[in-house]
Image (cartoon, rainbow, N blue to C red):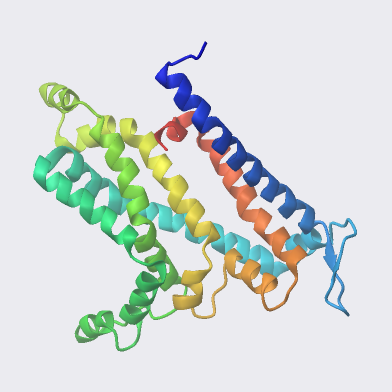
Amino acid sequence: MIDRRPGLRVGLLLTPPMLWLGVAYLGALAALLVTSLWTQNDFTGSIERAWTLENFRTLFTVDVYRTITLRTIGIAALVTVIDVVLAFPIALYMAKVASPRLQRILVISVLTPLWASYLVKAYAWRGMLSADGPIAWIARPFGLDTPGYGLPAVVITLSYLWLPYMILPVYAGLERLPDSLFEASADLGAGAWTTLRRVVFPMAFPAVVAGSIFTFSLSMGDYIAVKIVGGTGQLLGNVVYDNQGAANNLPFAAAVATVPIVVMLAYLTAVRRTGALENL
């Protein structure tokens, strides 16, 4: 006898693909970890499949790699904070102030940049931040200079690139808040700022953390933006790219790639109790 319950059929259909995706993901991580424990022959450049912790010893003892790691974490955290500051008022207006028609227009406006090419948006910021770009034209009459290319440009570019990934989860979280909360807070004599600080933000905090998972992880792994607007600055993604490509040192590249993974696992463990994972 065939069970015709829709939920069961959907579950049976979804289980094998999700299982294979999990196996492929965990398998890739296992391969990455195994590769990081190999080494490269300095003379021939070939990979020697002998177990060693030399790559991790280099990663943790050489000052430049510690500096790059801390710089990458700092930039990812700064990008996340900037996106929270920008996204929260936008999402609040979309969810609780805008009319239904305007709300749809704003949602489409947030989603539209996601359809544009990453490279197009990054090179657009390169043009804007150049010495002859629009920002320089605006700033020059006021005696100001364009940020140019460097780590500030990387922060600006990444904040723009990942902003929709913060707006959408926060918007979804705020939209679920009942309007009666705002009315009850006003009836109790609370002002708009007090309501925002004591009622709205605490209840939307899991959605904010959910968005931060996207912005933080995407910033940690980015290596293209810093190549385009970063000048001489380096992040962990660039170290992985350079060692996997020009240097052809795949074991050390794999060792460096484990750092963002460990940092993200620690971050996910820290936010697990906030309920943010349920908002993804």
Location of residue 30 with respect to 269 vertically, above or below: below
Residue 278's quadrant in the figure? top left
* Residue 259 screen position, x and y as percent: 65, 55
* Residue drawn at the location 47% of the way across and 20% of the way down: 8
Q: Position of residue 167 (x, y in %)?
A: 30, 48
Q: Is residue 198 above or below residue 61?
A: above
Give the residue furthest to the front: 1
Q: Position of residue 136 (x, y in %)?
A: 27, 83
Q: Is residue 235 shown above or below 167?
A: below
Instruction: Check the image and name the residue furthest to the bottom.
Output: 132
Position in image of residue 236 (x %, y %): 60, 64
Where the C terminus falls, by quadrant? top left
Q: Residue at x 31, y 41 (%)?
A: 170
Q: Residue at x 67, y 63 (%)?
A: 66
Q: Residue at 14% of width from left, 33% of height from top?
A: 191
Q: Quadrant of residue 61?
A: bottom right
Q: Return the residue nearer the eye: 147 or 98.
A: 98
Can you tell which quarter of the image residue 177 is in?
top left
Is residue 5 visible in the rendered image? The answer is yes
| Horizontal side, residue 86 vs residue 156: left or right | left
Q: Nearer the viewer, residue 73 or 103?
A: 103
58 left or right, relative to 133 = right
The reply to whether residue 189 is visible in this rendering is no
**Side of 129 relative to 102 (left or right):** right
